[in-house]
């Protein structure tokens, strides 16, 4: 049963990576920028949920909704203050700004909540599911994480293909200038992308802290980097690619920890990224774009 247990844990962890990677891939696919502060929004979402449940005594559902609303507002504010003035700036300036926003959020969290780890209480107070006479145990949070990942991926796919705002996002992704000429408000569209991505980061933060119940200002840093790696492996800019890359990365990490060693697991994860980029530079489901020069 060890193999099945590792597979379940890998899919659960990979689903968290996939939800985070969906935020990365939406921002890159439409705004053509890498928001490296995305991992710190995960941390903020975890803290909002923690304060709501532990200090305010709110029910888990209300705490999660409050976390989503808080991170959505944070995403809009960050985009308007930090990224909007750099619409026409070189990509290096945007990248440095994103790193600066990341450090700002981390250090603000240190000042507000301190550096001590917080014991995060799971949003689900349910017993584990035991199968095969107790030989296989499945935690409810794992099932909820996988279900949330599938629901979010399907919802985003329908949103981008069926709704007016989703079609506007796809138009901005193809050509911002042409989209603006057709009457699409590019600034509003990009702000909506950041809002959705930050809301997804809040969900991922709550699920991550419920699975690994330790919360601190650096909680989102490493998962954020791994989720970005998952987005690149799957094909950054592709919603199914982000989901596929996240699940694959989670499975590889869990099996590496189980059969090779915890210390080498992260190295193996990034080695897989190198191999995939050597074979398919655009990612597993990414599309190669040929530009005339």
Image: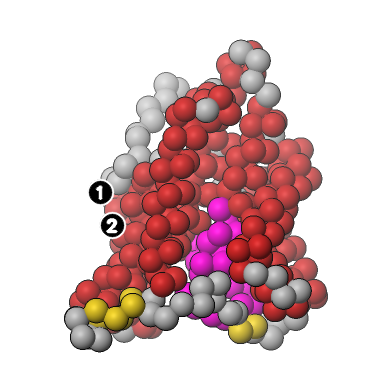
- Spot the residue most to the top: 182
Residue drawn at the location 59% of the way across and 37% of the way down: 31
In the image, 180 versus 49, the foreground residue is: 49
User: Which residues make up the magenta segment?
Assistant: 200-225
Residue drawn at the location 41% of the way across and 43% of the way down: 154
Does 101 appear in magenta?
Answer: no
Residue 47 image offset from top left, x and y in percent: 68, 70
Q: Which residue is mark 1?
A: 279
Counting other residues with Cα less than 10 Å from the Cα at mark 2, is it few (<14), some (14-19), or many (20 or more)? Answer: few
Q: Secondary structure at mark 2?
A: helix
Q: Which residue is mark 2?
A: 275
State whether residue 59 appears in this view.
yes
In the image, 107 versus 219, the foreground residue is: 219
Q: Secondary structure at mark 1?
A: helix
Residue 239 image offset from top left, x and y in percent: 42, 43
Residue drawn at the location 35% of the way across and 34% of the way down: 288
Q: Are marks 2 and 1 in contact (CB under 8 Å)?
A: yes
Res 5 quadrant in image: bottom left
The quadrant the N terminus occupies is bottom left
Q: Is residue 67 above or below residue 209?
A: above
State whether residue 2 appears in this view.
no
**Dominant secondary structure, magenta:** helix
Separation (CA) of disc 2 from disc 1: 6 Å
Residue 138 as seen in the image, left or right of residue 104: left
Q: Is residue 214 above or below residue 37?
A: below
Q: Is residue 112 above or below residue 72?
A: below
């Amino acid at each position: 049963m060890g193999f099945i247990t590792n597979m379940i844990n890998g899919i659960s962890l990979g689903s968290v990576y996939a939800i985070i990677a969906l935020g990365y891939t939406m921002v890159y696919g439409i705004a053509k920028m890498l928001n490296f502060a995305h991992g710190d929004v995960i941390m903020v979402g975890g803290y909002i949920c923690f304060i709501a449940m532990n200090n305010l005594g709110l029910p888990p559902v209300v705490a999660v909704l409050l976390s989503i609303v808080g991170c959505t507002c944070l995403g809009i504010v960050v985009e308007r203050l930090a990224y909007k003035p750099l619409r026409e700036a070189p990509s290096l300036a945007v990248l440095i700004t994103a790193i600066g926003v990341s450090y700002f959020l981390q250090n603000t969290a240190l000042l507000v909540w301190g550096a001590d780890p917080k014991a995060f209480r799971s949003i689900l107070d349910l017993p584990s599911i035991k199968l095969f006479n107790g030989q296989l145990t499945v935690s409810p949070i794992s099932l909820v994480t996988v279900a949330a990942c599938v629901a979010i991926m399907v919802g985003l796919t329908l949103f981008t293909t069926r709704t007016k705002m989703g079609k506007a996002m796809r138009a901005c992704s193809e050509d911002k200038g042409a989209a603006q000429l057709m009457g699409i408000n590019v600034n509003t569209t990009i702000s909506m992308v950041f809002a959705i991505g930050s809301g997804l980061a809040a969900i991922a933060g709550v699920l991550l802290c419920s699975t690994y119940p330790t919360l601190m200002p650096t909680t989102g840093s490493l998962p954020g980097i791994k989720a970005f790696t998952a987005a690149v492996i799957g094909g950054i800019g592709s919603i199914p690619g982000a989901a596929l890359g996240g699940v694959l990365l989670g499975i590889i990490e869990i099996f590496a920890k189980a059969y090779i060693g915890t210390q080498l697991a992260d190295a193996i994860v990034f080695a897989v990224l190198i191999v995939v980029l050597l074979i398919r530079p655009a990612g597993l489901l990414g599309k190669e774009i040929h530009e005339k020069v």
